[in-house]
Image (spheres, grey):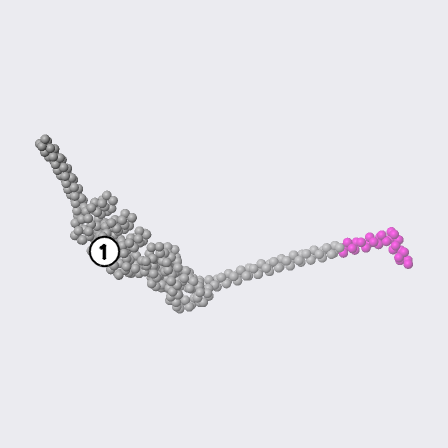
Amino acid sequence: MWPLLLAQTLTTWTIVTWTLIALLVMVTLVFVASFIAFGALWIQASAASARVSMSSLVGMYFRQVRAPIIVNAKIMAAQAGLDISSRNGITTQRLEAHYLAGGNVMSVIQAIIAAQRAGIDLDFDRAAAIDLAGRDVLDAVRTSVQPKVIDCPDPRRSGKATLSAIAKDGVELRVRTRVTVRTNLEQLIGGATEETIIARVGESIISSIGSSDSHQKVLENPDLISRTVLRRGLDAQTAFQIVSIDIADIDVGDNIGARLRADQAEADVRVARARAEGRRAEAIAMEQENRAKVVENRANLVLAEAEVPRAMANAFRQGNLGSTTGG
């Protein structure tokens, strides 16, 4: 009996041993295959202290995430001194999540690095939200550091090169303005875009010129208009902060007031002529009516004169004429 039990025990150990050997071989093959596929990236990340595990690289493959982008982004963050700790830092999982959401991982990391160098408070969550909102977060950071200039009006959008405004004296002024803006990162999500800035500035300039008593005052001090417009806080609820508004060019256009007065005078002349023509027509009609009355009166006179012989004839026939004569 003991030999049978010993043989069964040896058989069991043999099966377990070969099973363990097979599992070890499979694990070794998987590790070798993974190292062949992702070893270069893993070594690159480890050399840069970017902390990207082999299991994360394999998981990226199955999640259809481009591992080189994630690794390069984390290496860039680590080399720039950003926080890549697993608690609150820029972790591999956060980078993957932003990539899977359709975001531009490299642009976000570059924007955070640029903001850190410029002393601008920009964390990963805000940068990722700005990027997913469809804004160029890297360009926004650059505009925050180096303001950009917007033409008002913008010929590319409106097809007009100047704004047309009319002072109280009726003279047209054609103005071209340049607005210097800086990106407001706190209001970049949900804030109005450049089109709103251009529309507000254009409206305020036209209103300011329209409230001026004379176009000459505007020509003498164009900076008064820009300062007045700047004090109105036109950048409220927008993604930008207005730094300055400068009048780049101002030209005198047509005398709209004189033209309007001339047109009004011509219209008044036409109205007066029409009224005079109406009165003349009424006079002619009255004259014709009086002539008709004269003809009618003449006809009545002729009829009355015709009645005299008839009356005399009747008197003769009745003998009244003779008796009246004899008496």
Res. 231 image quadrant: bottom left
Where residue 294 appears, as percent x and y from the top left, is 71, 57
Q: Is residue 127 a member of the stretch shown in magenta? A: no
Q: Could you tell me which quadrant the C terminus lies in?
A: bottom right
Give the residue at the far right of this rendering: 327
Give the residue at the far left of this rendering: 3
Where residue 20 appears, as percent x and y from the top left, is 14, 39
Residue 154 makes an appearance in the image = no
Q: Within 10 Å of the Cα at label 1, are there few (<14), some (14-19), or many (20+) other Cα atoms? A: some
The residue identified by callout 1 is: 83
Query: Is 261 situated left or right of 130 in this image?
Result: right
Q: Could you tell me which quadrant the N terminus lies in?
A: top left
The residue stretch that appears in magenta: 301-327
Three-letter amino acid code at the position of disc 1: Asp
Q: Residue at x 19, y 51 (%)?
A: 51
Is residue 266 shown above or below 96? Answer: below
Q: Residue at x 70, y 55 (%)?
A: 292
Q: Residue at x 27, y 49 (%)?
A: 97
Query: Is 198 situated left or right of 118 in this image?
Result: right
